[in-house]
Amino acid sequence: MLLKRIAVDTTELSTGMYVAMLDRPWLETPFVFQGFEIQDKFEIELLQSYCRYVYVDVDRGKMSATDIRALLSSRKERPTSKPSGIKQTHHDKGWLARFRALILRMGLGRLLISSAKGAISGYKISSTVRGEAALANKAYELLSAQHKSILERANQEGLVDMEGVAKAVTPTIESVLRNPNAIAWTIFSKKRGGRYYNRAVATSVWAIMFGRQLGFDREALQDLAVGGLLLDIGNVNLSADILNMEGAITIEQYEHLSHHVQLGLEILRASKGVSQNVIDMVRCHHERADGSGYPDKLTGTNIPIYGRIAGIVDCYDAMTTKTSYSPATAAYDAARELNDMRGEQFQTEVVEQFLLTIGMFPTGSVVALNNGKVGVVLEQNQSHPLRPKIMLLLDNARQPFSRPKILDMRKLKEEASNPKAVWIEKGHEHGAFGIDPSKYFST
């Protein structure tokens, strides 16, 4: 019987082949979607950057099984089992060009900053998490306080001081540019605090981080920061009883809440100096690519790119935040749920790049290892999203270490067959095991 899956050297790939499996975990590559038909040369080059072999399903894709076998017939040897331990690097000379090609496919070319050598997005990490921690926390607290003033003025005067908002987001943008891991840690620390958490500020931060990952220029980052902060500005004119109610809501109450988009647009249109990008974010943050969103049921690329970004950052923060009517979802589970939405509620490329931005185990999130130890993610590993740097806090008996230990998973064995292999077994909701990430900022 002929095999349905054939191992193919990535140098011999062709458009129309259906890639069913890689020679490494899917989540260690940009191809978060598991299984796809090769559409163009760009995808072939990207596969070559990460993999030596891939496994092609001959019964799927536009290229027929006969054509695939004919193409490969000249090969003298072909592996019959999944290779392991292959180490590739995507930070080669052509990687940045391929990354930027993806950005162009998303219609974002004019927003890109000039490339910085050694930084995929064009921005380099210029401070450590520990060194940036105090500044990140200060930026968060400052923006939270200023957001309160923004809401009060919107409620009293029906407008927003856009110059003031632009100045308010500046320290946060600067912190994200220096090191996004620090402020991500801050957000997850604040989430545990409940009443000290500001969803608008967090959404603004996720938007800036996403823009940083995509290589947006400074002006574009400012629009993302402002738009993220003002997504729900229309809530100031909604009933406080419904906004703060607990439990499930009725259809009528849902329709009432959905009016916050139109109310927010009215406030922005009454304000001076509001960019179209910010308006797009407020108008479209509940639109979905499959047309299931509101208020206009826009589909696909009819949703402006800023609206697409606003939709996914707002959705992610809503998932990972405890409210009066829903519990918080663990960051890892939220990432998996977003991955399931790719190609449906959200554009595939938007989901892939956002997951690379935050990581499958975001900085500041609580994780448990296969050896029973528990810690908090300290820093992302862009080339291997499942192998971040972790601050270990609990031993395998779930007892606190006398002193936190730093574990860089990039340096550990990862093959499951190796008895010393270590991997993240599960991501937990913020506050799990009684862990408060904010306690370890100055450790």
Image (tube, helix red, strand yellow):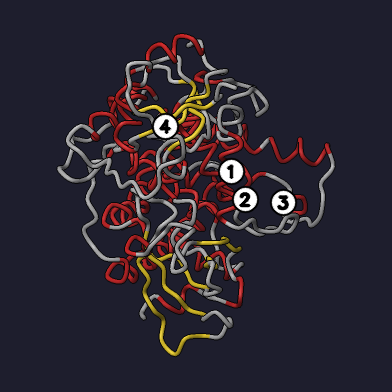
Name the quarter where the C terminus is drawn: bottom left
Using the image, tell me which numbered label, if any, was put on residue 54.
4
Dot 1 or dot 4: first in sequence order is 4
Q: CA distance from mark 2 to mark 4?
A: 34 Å
The secondary element bearing badge 2 is classed as helix
| Residue 413 x/y as whole percent | 38, 62
Q: Which residue is mark 1?
A: 315
Q: Which residue is mark 3?
A: 243
Dot 4 or dot 3: first in sequence order is 4
Task: Kindly identify the amino acid type of the residue bearing the numbered disc 4.
Answer: Val
Question: As displayed, is residue 199 above or below residue 71?
Answer: below
| Residue 171 x/y as whole percent | 31, 57
State which mark lies toward you, 1 or 3: 1
Name the quarter where the N terminus is drawn: top right
Q: Are marks 1 and 2 in contact (CB under 8 Å)?
A: yes
Q: CA distance from mark 3 to mark 2?
A: 17 Å
The secondary element bearing badge 1 is classed as helix
The secondary element bearing badge 3 is classed as helix
Q: CA distance from mark 1 to mark 4?
A: 33 Å
Task: Kindly identify the amino acid type of the residue bearing the numbered disc 2.
Answer: Met
Dot 1 or dot 3: first in sequence order is 3
Residue 163 is left or right of residue 206, and the answer is left
Q: Are marks 1 and 4 in contact (CB under 8 Å)?
A: no
Dot 3 or dot 2: first in sequence order is 3
Q: Which residue is mark 2?
A: 319
